[in-house]
Amino acid sequence: MSESSSLCVFCGSSAGHSPSFAEAARLIGEAIVRNRAMLVYGGGRVGLMGIVADAVLSAGGRAVGVIPEALATKEIAHDGLSELHVVAGMHERKALMAARSSAFLALPGGIGTFEEFFEILSWQALGIHSKPIGLLNVGGYFDPLLSLLDHGIASRFIRPAHLRPLVVSDQAEAIVRKLLGHEDVVTPTPWLSLDQS
């Protein structure tokens, strides 16, 4: 892993019902720093977003946030980050997060987390990027999602090759190591470039 490694984390702006979600976010933040990488995330100070960022900063690491202006003005932006980029909207947010990241990891979260995960997975399937993607499956949170993806394969709407590179684990340290040490994913000839998406 090089000093320029960075892990983009998608996660909830709330902490969820189980303390295991917050604990997992903390462990991910610490693992990012132990693996000499930087956090790239949505820039919030609330929920799992704030927990993972605070864990990175407390361990002496760098945390880069990217937040839309509309959310920053609602005072949920984290004001203690190494870098905070305030952008016009959600599309700019996701494009900048993708550009600054070596790999992607989704933790438990809501609609926004699912949307970010599916967009980055779609970009990989289209050949827009070849970076690894992971799911931290805390307490089986993503089990229904994984079943849905399997159903998509069985129904022949999803190609198995598009999900093979997906890394799924319930262990924070193991998944961070795997994602940051991973080779780029072999994708088909790109259908689109990032500026066409």
Image (spheres, rainbow, N blue to C red):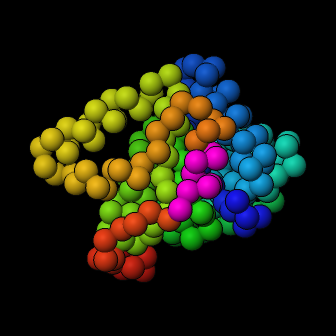
Toward the viewer: 72 or 9?
9
The image quadrant of residue 55 is top right
Please report the residue visible at 63 percent of the width from the left and 20 percent of the height from the top: 19
Decide: is 17 above or below 31.
above
Toward the viewer: 95 or 34?
34
Task: Pinpoint residue 192: horizontal percent, then vertical percent.
Answer: 33, 78
Task: Pinpoint residue 184: horizontal percent, then vertical percent.
Answer: 50, 65
Q: Is residue 84 visible?
A: no
In the displayed structure, does residue 156 sit left or right of residue 71? left
Please report the residue visible at 54 percent of the width from the left and 30 percent of the height from the top: 170
Quadrant of the image for the N terminus?
Answer: bottom right
In the displayed structure, does residue 138 sit left or right of residue 79? left
The image quadrant of residue 7 is bottom right
Decide: is 63 above or below 91.
above
As drawn, the residue found furthest toward the left would be 155
Quadrant of the image for the C terminus?
Answer: bottom left
Decide: is 64 above or below 32.
below
Task: Pinpoint residue 119: horizontal percent, then vertical percent.
Answer: 39, 58
Q: Is residue 144 visible?
A: yes
Decide: is 72 above or below 31.
below
Q: Which residues are magenta?
A: 176-183
Toward the viewer: 124 or 96?
124
Please report the residue visible at 21 percent of the width from the left and 52 percent of the height from the top: 158
Please report the residue visible at 57 percent of the width from the left and 19 percent of the height from the top: 18
Q: Is residue 181 magenta?
A: yes
Toward the viewer: 139 or 186?
186
As drawn, the residue found furthest toward the top would be 18
Task: Pinpoint residue 85: horizontal percent, then vertical percent.
Answer: 68, 66
